[in-house]
Structure formats: C-alpha cells, structure tokens
Image (spheres, rainbow, N blue to C red):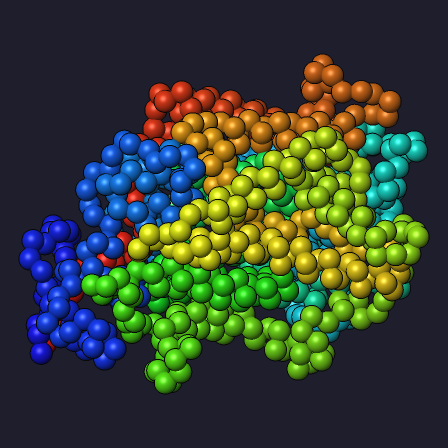
Amino acid sequence: MTKLSTGTSDEDAHPASLADVDERLVTPRQRRRRGRTRRAGPASIDARGVRLPCSLMTPETPTTDKPEPRGEEPLAADAADHPAGTGATTGTGTASTAGTGTEAGTGSGGGVAGRRPAVPALVLLITALHVALLVTYAFVYPTWTGYDEAQHVDMVYGLQHGAGWPAPGEKMIATGVAATSDDFDRGRYQDMFQSGGKRRGSPSFAEIAPTPRGERRSFDELGGATPVDDGRLSNQMIQHPPLVYAVGAGLLEILPGSAGWAYDQQVLALRLLNILIVAPLPLLAWAAARRFGLPGPLATAAAALPLAVPGFTRVGATFNNDGILILATGALTVMLAGVVRGDLRRRTAAWAGLWFGVAMLSKAFAFALPVTIAAAYLVGWLRLRRRVQATDDGSPARVPSPHRLPVLRRLPVLRDLPVLPATIAVGLGLVIGGWWWVRNFVLYDALQPNGWATNPPRREALLLPDSFLTWFGYFFRTMISRFWGGLGMFEPPQLSPVAIVAATVAVVGLCVTAVVAAARRGQPAAGEPGRIARLGAPLVLLAPVAFAYLMVGQRSWAEYERYTRGIAVQGRYLYLGLVGLAVVTAAGLGRMLGGRARLAPLTVLAGAALMQGLALLAVCSYYWLPRGVAFTPAQVPDIVSAAARWAPLPFGVTVTVFVLTALGWIAALTLAARAAAGGGRADGAEAGPAAEDPAAHLARQETPARS
C-alpha cells in the first residue's frame, strides 16, 4: 500500500512534491479506471473530512485587482470558493482589497478558529444608535402602550408573587396591574389609543394630565397580586413558554427596593430588559453577513437595516416575548450563515442547537426552525460535495464523510449526508425547549392551547364580501403596513403609505436580485458550489421570514372562516427573521452597487433615518400634539415636554435621551459618509486580512499520514 503524504500546512500552501492517494479512499471502479499506479495532486482535508487536491484549495496568495466581467460576478457568498489569485468578485467588485473578502470567524463559538475580524467602528456606532433609539421609543410610548404589554407584565408579576403557571383560562390579571392598564385597554384612553378616536374628538395624551410622578404608586399599593373578578377574559399569555417572564421576575427580584417603585418604573425596568435582549441585533446581522461571505461595507449595511424598521423599534422598546425570539433566531441565523457555506462542524451544530432551544422557549413560531436548520445543512453539504478529489479523467471520486451516523453506513442514499451535525442542532434544541410543548400536549391535548380557554367575542371589523380574495387582499396589505409601521394599537398612528410601499419594493427587489444573481450564474467550475447550493444559501436565510408569514396567514385564514374578520394579522411576527432578511438585502444591494459598495452603509442609514423620522412624526403628531394642531418644527419643545410628563423618570432624563439619539444619528451618518468617500476604515472595508470560508480554513490543516 502506498504511503499518504501529510497535507499542506499554513506555512506551505503549495508543496512542491506530489503525494500518493490513500488507496482506502479510492473505490474499485476508480482503480479499474485509472490504474493503481496513477497519482493525484497533494491532498488535504475539507470541512467534511473529504480529501481535496491542492487545485481545489484556497491559496493564501494575494488577490489581484483585475475584476471579472460584470455578467460573471459570483454572489458574495461564493467568493471564497474561487482561488484568491483569480480576482473573483463578490457582487460588489473584486475581492482584491484585504478585508473585503469573505468572513467566517464570527459568532459565539460558531466561527472558524483563527483570527477573527474586529467589529468596525461604524457597526459599533450603529449598535449604540439602535439602543438609543429603543430607549427613545420607550419614552415616546407611555406605559401600557406596547402590544399586550399589561398581560406580559402581569405574567412577571404573577411569578414574583407565587402564582405559578395556571391552566389556560385560569390566570386572571392582577388587581395591581389592572388598576392603571385598564385605562388603555377598556377605560378613558381606549378610544384614542385603540380605535383612532382622536379623529372623532377624543383627547390625545398631550391634552390629558397624567398622575404626577411623585404620586404614582407601586403594583402592591394599587391592589397587589389579587386577581380581578369582574368577569373579563383571562390572561391569554399563559399559552406561551415562561422563559422571558421568569427572567423578568428574577430581574425585579434582584433590583433593590423594586417592589416599592412606582408601577411605571417597574414596567420601565422590564422594557429595558427587552431592550437589552434585542440590542445585539445589528451586531448579529453584521456577523451573519460576514459568515455568509459579504465584504465589510455590505456587512455594515446589513447591520443598519434593522434601524429602518420602525415597527421593530417599537416592539423592542416595550416589554413582550417577541424580543427573546428575535434574539434567538438572529443568533441561530449567524450559525446557519456559516453552515450554508460548508461549516459542518459539531461545535457549530451545538451552538445552533442552543439558540434553537432558546427560541423554542419563547414562542410557537420556533416550530418552523427545524426545517430551516435541515435545509441549511443540506445546502452546506451540497456546497462541499463539489469539493471532492478528482481522478485524472475528471470524474469525481466518492469519498466518505465523517459527519454521518454509523447506522447509516449501509444506506447509500444517506451515507454522505451531514446527518450527525444536523441531528445535534435539532436534537439539542428539542432537548432544551421541546419539553414545554410536550408538557402542553400531555396536559391539554394541544401543543399550544387556547390561552383564554374559550372563543372570545371579536371587535375587528367585518371583511365583506366573504371570499378568499377579500381576506387575502386585507392580509397582504396589513402585513406589509404593520411590518414597517406597526405604530399604534392598531391604527393610527400609521406610517406614510408611500414610505411603506417604497420600503417594501426596495427590500423585496434587493432580495430577488440576490436570489436571481445566485441562480443565473453560469456552469460552475470544478470545486465551485453548484447552482442548487448557490440558490439555496440566500433562501435558507429568508426561510424564517417566509415560514412565519405562512404561519400567520394560515391562522388568519382559519379565523376569517370562523368570524369573517381579519384577526391576528401582525407584521411583528416576521421580525424573528430580520437578521437573515438584512443579510440577503445587503447582498442584493451589493449586486446593484457593483464597485460602489462603499455607498451601501450610507444608503441604508439614510433610508433608516428617513423611515424613523416619518415614524416619529406620525407617533408624536397623534399622541403628543393637541387636537387640530399640525406639526411644525416649533412644536418640538411642546412634544418633548408632553412626553416627559408621562415618562417614569425625571424631565431631564427624557430630554437627555432624545438629545443623545439625535447626536447618534448625526455621528453615524457622518461616519458612513466618510467611509463612502473612502476616507476611513469605519465600515471594516480595509481592516484585517482577507477572510476565508470554513472549508478553505480546514483545507489548510495538517493531515496525519496513513499507512
């Protein structure tokens, strides 16, 4: 038996001598075809443990500045599959500049070992601006104006006072919570807040004198944990997993003296918890984009895209169970962005399983994630499948995969599939979070029981004539409107329809551009990902949004058939996929900009500033200006003063938050403009060495000799 030479090392990417191929990795058919004495090029190991010839490895040589023809540019996610010396582009020009290649070293434990890229200053500033904007919304929206905020807070308050987790229909809201929240749900503010009553003469918050800050009492003083007994519906949030509520209860328990705080200050503490949960989203979008292979400017643009969705900012600034799902799915997307590019390591699978488990303990929308995880591993396997050792006549050699379970060795169809890492990811998530849903099924014969334990009367308007087209038209329009600008309960205030349509067309168009660019590339060369793998990569990142859209539609249609009303049509349910949407949108933007990719961060930030400005204009005009008063710049002090009167903290804190947010916008736009002009490295375009893809990294590792 011939000896197997050691693989290439980091210092010797191109060994001069040829190595014998391990005969144990060659099938009898290949032996007959080429003969036992034929030799292949020196081999190494790819991300699946597949032995590769040097011709399929990514050399550590400087890239050239010569771009490929525009029509042959690969999608950004495929840039690392080209030898670096070929001047392969990433959809935004060539990958010639250090730091503008692909990236794979981000994420907690899920990145490729080795040097990791530093987070660019502009991304850090975008994240800080994101947090400041969230805190601003927490003051612009008075206590109890978040989606079902009273019910979410009541779950926390119940856990604090030993209420446990009652059965559906048995959790009545606490008297201390209802004492003030009822004003918004069924009392004096209900018409203006929930039904657009300001247009019919109901006073706005600016015209209502709130309880003076020093006279606001705590939940305990307002009635405590005693359940109300007025015959109202129960707290339906009992149908959701308890993770975020348990964390909230723990937070209030460890804050000294929090039980005696005014009710709005306790709610603010829970709002700040949700802000902390969703604060990393721009960083996650940047990390996912780098692992997906986008160059620095496009990854920075992906980080800025969450700021362009005012509805998400409103959700993140109030207390709910959406934030933990958004965080968990976003972190999972970071992992899957590497998986679709060939990172099939068990460590990455374990991190993916951890975040999937957290998502399972947040909301039922996590049920769609196992399909997304499986699709990601299939795409990653297809990508690496082409990185196989070729025989002298060009036919691919079938090689064993270390990522399979022993029981599958006799199943030819499944033999080489990455079953083990996919099983780790899905199985670990089910172990962490699946128990909750099994509990529900055992106790209530349903994975997610009706939290009210009854069919409540509906107050939504009838949708006539009764037909599928009537429902679908309403569903389509409302999902788009509430995705971008779910600013009220329900409407108004409402974002400008022009802004909603423009933003929708832009994002959908860029996503389609990215997907079509992946699908339309010509026949791949040896070692490059095939058409299905290229097409599947962006589709996997869009899968959480797509599945959530279908799940919302299915439930809404079922409710329409029962009530002939538009029910449960909430764009916020799509925010779980915001990170993947940001990455694919940035990839499409890079394709559109070509060699002007430095403009991407400024373009997205400018659009985000416009969207947030229009949203705050709508909210402040409706809530914080008197009836019949139109907004003018001269009204800004009055708006700030009115919002500060309702805020849980002193006037100076509110003003400081607003000022810091405005300064953050100025700083971010200035830094983005400077980066667009080529005057700095703020977007990471020139920082650090060129990145590599997981398979290329593993291909450079030493391979022990076999005999």
In front here: 145 or 346? 346
On the picture, is 437 further left or further right than 384? right
Is residue 42 depicted above or below 599 in this figure? Answer: below
Give the residue at x 52% y 47%: 515
Tell whether 78 sits left or right of 514: left
| Residue name at image x 21 percent, y 38 percent | 62
> What residue appears at the point 19 percent right and 56 percent down from the top-left corner?
54
Q: Outermost residue toward the top? A: 634
Left or right for 367, reference 221: left
Viewport quadrant of the C terminus: bottom left
Count numbered badges in the picture.
0
How far across and how far down the image is residue 570, in percent? 72, 50
**484 over 111 or under it: above or below:** above
Residue at screen point 24% across, 50% down: 58
The answer to whether residue 557 shows anywhere in this view is yes
In front: 455, or 385? Answer: 385
Whether residue 659 is situated above or below residue 131 in the rendered picture: above
Residue nearest the viewer, comparing 420 with 272 = 420
Left or right of 704 in this view: 151: right
Quarter of the rendering occupied by the N terminus: bottom left
Q: Position of residue 143 (x, y in %)?
A: 71, 43
Residue 630: image location, x then y, percent: 80, 20
The reply to whether residue 424 is visible in this rendering is no
Q: Say which of 493 and 537 sits in front.
A: 537
Residue 133 position (above or below residue 697): above
Percent x, y for residue 330?
Answer: 51, 52
